Amino acid sequence: MALSRYLRYVIRFIIEYGTFIVILAIGVVIYRIVFLEAVEQYLERSLWIFRYVWLGNGEISLFDYTLTYQFEGYSDYSFYYVHWGQNMLDGVMPYTSDFGYREIGWYVNENGLYIFPPLTAIFYAIGIMLPVDNWGIGFLLAAFSYLTVFPVYGLGRELSNNRYVGEAAALTYLLSPCVLYHSIFLWMNPAPFVFFFFMGFYMLVRGNKLTGVLLIVVSALFKQTAWFFAFPLVTYLLIRGKSESHKEIDQPETEIEDEEEEEEPSATIIDRINATIDISGFLKYTIIVLVFAAAILFPFLISQPHMFDHWRLAMGGFPLEPPYTDPPGYGTPITLPYLPVMAGLPLVAEIMNNIVSYGFLLYFGVILFAGVMLLEPRDNSEIKVYLRRLLFLTFLLMMWVYLTGPRGVFKYYFVLMAPFFSIFSSSKMVTSKDEHVSFSFSMLWLPLALSLVILIPPREIYLFGIILISLGYAMGQKVGLFWRTLTAPIRWVIKQLRNRTESYFQGFVVVKRRVEYAIYPERFEESR
């Protein structure tokens, strides 16, 4: 069966990307339904100032069991985003007290000082420019949330060398309850910086280093949270790693030639440093990053030299107040000390409050993860295995930042974790040192389950679920071993069924090989 070259390429494209295209279509349908429901509720209000969502506590009956949930709701879209977007278009500079003041008819909205990098305010202004009734920002946030599926798919596929893993990652990301609720329905703001980070990291995986670096810098110019992405980025740019040309440096001393033993020690040290650290390359990209960031920040810095003072306000925390027995107010971000408060342990809460408020846990963890990243072995012949590990360490770093940060967290912050959950959805993706990672059924349900662990529990205690998730990933090898032991009987039954039914499908196997030969003739030529 001979096929023309054009027809063969079309069939290959359908085979390679057909499932992903179907997943994208499913995502469009679901996102459209959720987004239109949000728009309908938004337009029911007479003024944009009344855009808020509070679902509060609720109950779901499931198999005769009553499940209590508590979704966080917010008024940020109207109180902050639309306000700032309209002020930007009116020419009010963001780093002034006037930027937090706006009159609309009889209502005066005051939301304090603007504390984010400038791209966030510009993003809101672009959303207000869209010819719709002030829901243009929500549309852009939903669009960036949807577009994030492309780097999620790409990272899942590239880091596993398996398109099925990428397809599973794309599907579970689009179905993530956290993303659907916080980004598509509530129109919360993490979407742009999440998109630019994952797209930037995908560019690094693909070998487009400069593009990847600049995209991650763009992410950092949206939100200060993205500044922690500097640690994996610096590690990737600074560490040279092993290559064929440097293998001789790592050989045992007994195998080194006599003339090499006579070299000066200083020369050997310099060679080892040059073989490990790419100082010139790192300096080159540092200069590019500084020039790129300066080009964006320069107009704001010249007109508002106190811009960085506003940024530093985001570093402030929300420490607990005595007697350490009261649950947090609804407008208060949740910090780690609230767990002992809810457990009735005020003394533990006081001690933990002091540790968290001064940033001891945060700094300790950041330094620890930065050191682990720098010491992670890098083999350039298996660069994707290294990048998979680097991305996983970034995931753990951000979980630590959210858990131990003095500022605390709201549930919508964990929209950032949805792509991580979808990519690292099996123990093999976490622990394997092979380039190829096989598909696992956990890739279809685990990301959704982890998202629900964040979304459903009461806000006073859901950080306990975050701790369990973090520990599970940190002990990925042991958790994977436990899961494989637990599911061994099921795998044995499936294997027996496959062996017993294999003979009935011999005809299909023959047909499949003929079709593969027609579509991929080069594979059979290489195997000869």
Image (spheres, rainbow, N blue to C red):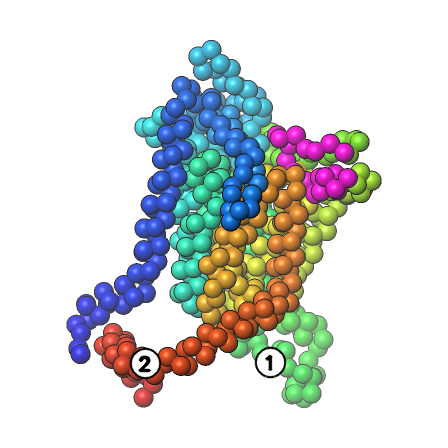
Mark 2 element type: helix
Give the residue at mark 2: 504
Quadrant showing the C terminus:
bottom left
Q: Residue furthest front?
A: 64
The amino acid on which the numbered mark 2 sits, given as a three-letter code, is: Tyr
The image quadrant that residue 519 belongs to is bottom left
Q: Is residue 89 magenta?
A: no
Going 59% across and 63% down the picture, which residue do you hit? 239
Q: Residue furthest top?
A: 106
Give the residue at mark 1: 248
Question: Upstream in the sequence, badge 1 or badge 2?
Answer: 1
The image quadrant that residue 105 belongs to is top left
Q: Where in the figure is residue 141, as x and y percent of width and height?
A: 43, 38
Q: Where in the figure is residue 182, as x and y percent of width and height?
A: 49, 39
Quadrant showing the N terminus:
bottom left
Q: Is residue 333 magenta?
A: yes
Q: Where in the figure is residue 478, as x and y percent of width and height?
A: 64, 67
